[in-house]
Each structure stands twice: as C-alpha cells, then as structure tokens.
Image: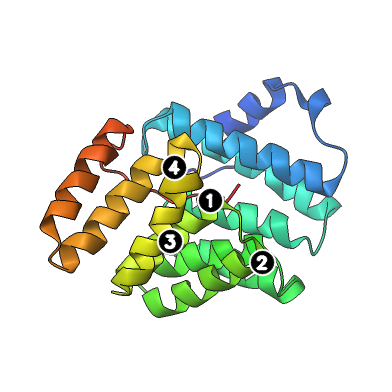
C-alpha cells in the first residue's frame, strides 16, 4: 500500500494548491457536495491502488481537514471522510469517522450509509444492514444507496429482499447503477438455485458495463 509519511509537504498538497480553489464552496453543504464530486471523479478516472489514484484521494483528504475546522460537528462532512478512508483501504478509520458522524446527527442518512458500508467491508454484515436500512428510510428514492442496501441484503442471505431492492434500481434507477444491480441480483438468484434468472442477469450486467468490481456507492 502507498503510505504517505508527510501530509503537509506531500505532492498531493502541491496538487491541491494548483486546483481552482476560488470555486470552492461557501457553505458546509456545498463543501460536502464538492468533496463528494471530486471523490467520484477520482474513482472514475484512476485505477484503484495506482499512485495517481492515491495522490488524488490524498489531495481530497487534505481539503477535508480544514473544512472540518470550518464546519465542526457536520455529520455529512464526516461521512464524506469515512467514504474517502474506505477508498484508501482504511476501513477501521472509516468506521470511526462514521460513528462520530452519527454521534453528531443520528438521523443523517449520509452517516448511516457510511457506517453501513464500513461495517460491510469489515464483514459485520448484520450491523451494516441495520444502518443501510435506516439510511434508506431517510432517503427512500436514493438509488445509489438502494444498490448498497441490495448488496447488504445479499450478504446477509436475505435473497428475496435483495432481488426486490435491486429490481427497483433496475426498473427505475439511473443507467450507471443498473449493471451493479443486475450483478448483485444474479448472486441472489444463484443462491436460491434460480440459475436461468441468474444467467440472464449476468448477461445484462455485462451489457450495462459491469466489469466485476462492485465498489461502494456514495449514495448521491
């Protein structure tokens, strides 16, 4: 793993200095939206684990720290940091940030989503499901979050619920989420012995561009 020993004088700090910070958000909510958008761009652009990928994520991390001082006790910002730590391969740290976010706001769907994702990564599937269910209650029409919930149902062997929730994404969700939804639903069908349905969903997953990496959706 690429380990950065000096964050203050790192390349990522230099990269951040070159970014158009004048467009940086004024409100805490806009700051979270900006950070989330930069995180998604990095995930889409770079190969996971590559030096470019890590440098981009560390640059975002450097931007979050001063924002946390400007926006103290902000649950969505802490949730964004949690998700960033997951992308950096630090699930225990991600879970700490998610739990702190929930302390500040127990009704933050972003915090519940982050906690659920982190718990699933450390294989605490039952606890992770509870948080994702709560997040889905708070944001019932968020399809990226629903994909996470669908995957969590599958991990918890609640296959009927996985099939139902993934079906909602496939029927009504955005195009870029459907490949993952087909893939997860295929796993649920296969676990139930419905092999024809599983094979059909596997084909659809490939047609929608799924390439075998489920990842974690940020719920945006």
Q: Are marks 4 and 3 in contact (CB under 8 Å)?
A: no
Provide residue 6's location: percent of width, then percent of height. 56, 42
Q: Earlier in the sequence, mark 2 or mark 4?
A: 2
Provide residue 138's location: percent of width, then percent of height. 66, 66
Residue shown at the point (49%, 49%) measured from the top left: 217
Provide residue 175's location: percent of width, then percent of height. 45, 35
Q: Are marks 1 and 4 in contact (CB under 8 Å)?
A: yes
Q: Residues within 10 Å of mark 1 (few under 14, many from 20)?
A: many
Mark 2 → mark 4, Cα distance in angstroms: 20 Å
Q: Which residue is mark 4?
A: 177
Mark 2 → mark 3, Cα distance in angstroms: 16 Å
Q: Which mark is residue 143?
A: 1
Q: Which residue is mark 2?
A: 138
Residue 191, quarter of picture: bottom left
Mark 4 → mark 3, Cα distance in angstroms: 13 Å
Q: Which residue is mark 3?
A: 165
Q: Earlier in the sequence, mark 2 or mark 3?
A: 2
Residue shown at the point (29%, 70%) measured from the top left: 159
Q: Residues within 10 Å of mark 4 (few under 14, many from 20)?
A: many
């Amino acid at each position: 793993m690429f380990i950065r020993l000096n964050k203050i004088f790192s390349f990522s700090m230099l990269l951040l200095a070159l970014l158009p910070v004048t467009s940086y958000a004024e409100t805490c909510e806009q700051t979270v939206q900006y950070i989330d958008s930069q995180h998604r761009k990095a995930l889409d652009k770079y190969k996971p684990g590559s030096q470019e990928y890590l440098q981009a994520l560390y640059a975002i991390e450097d931007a979050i720290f001063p924002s946390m001082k400007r926006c103290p006790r902000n649950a969505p910002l802490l949730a964004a940091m949690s998700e960033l730590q997951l992308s950096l391969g630090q699930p225990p740290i991600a879970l700490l940030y998610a739990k702190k976010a929930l302390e500040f706001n127990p009704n933050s769907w972003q915090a519940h989503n982050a906690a659920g994702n982190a718990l699933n990564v450390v294989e605490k599937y039952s606890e992770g499901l509870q948080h994702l269910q709560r997040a889905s209650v708070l944001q019932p029409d968020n399809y990226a979050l629903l994909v996470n919930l669908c995957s969590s149902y599958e991990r918890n062997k609640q296959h009927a619920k996985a099939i139902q929730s993934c079906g909602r994404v496939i029927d009504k969700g955005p195009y870029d989420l459907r490949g993952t939804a087909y893939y997860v639903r295929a796993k649920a069908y296969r676990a139930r012995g419905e092999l024809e349905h599983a094979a059909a969903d596997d084909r659809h997953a490939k047609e929608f561009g799924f390439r075998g990496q489920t990842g974690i959706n940020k719920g945006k």
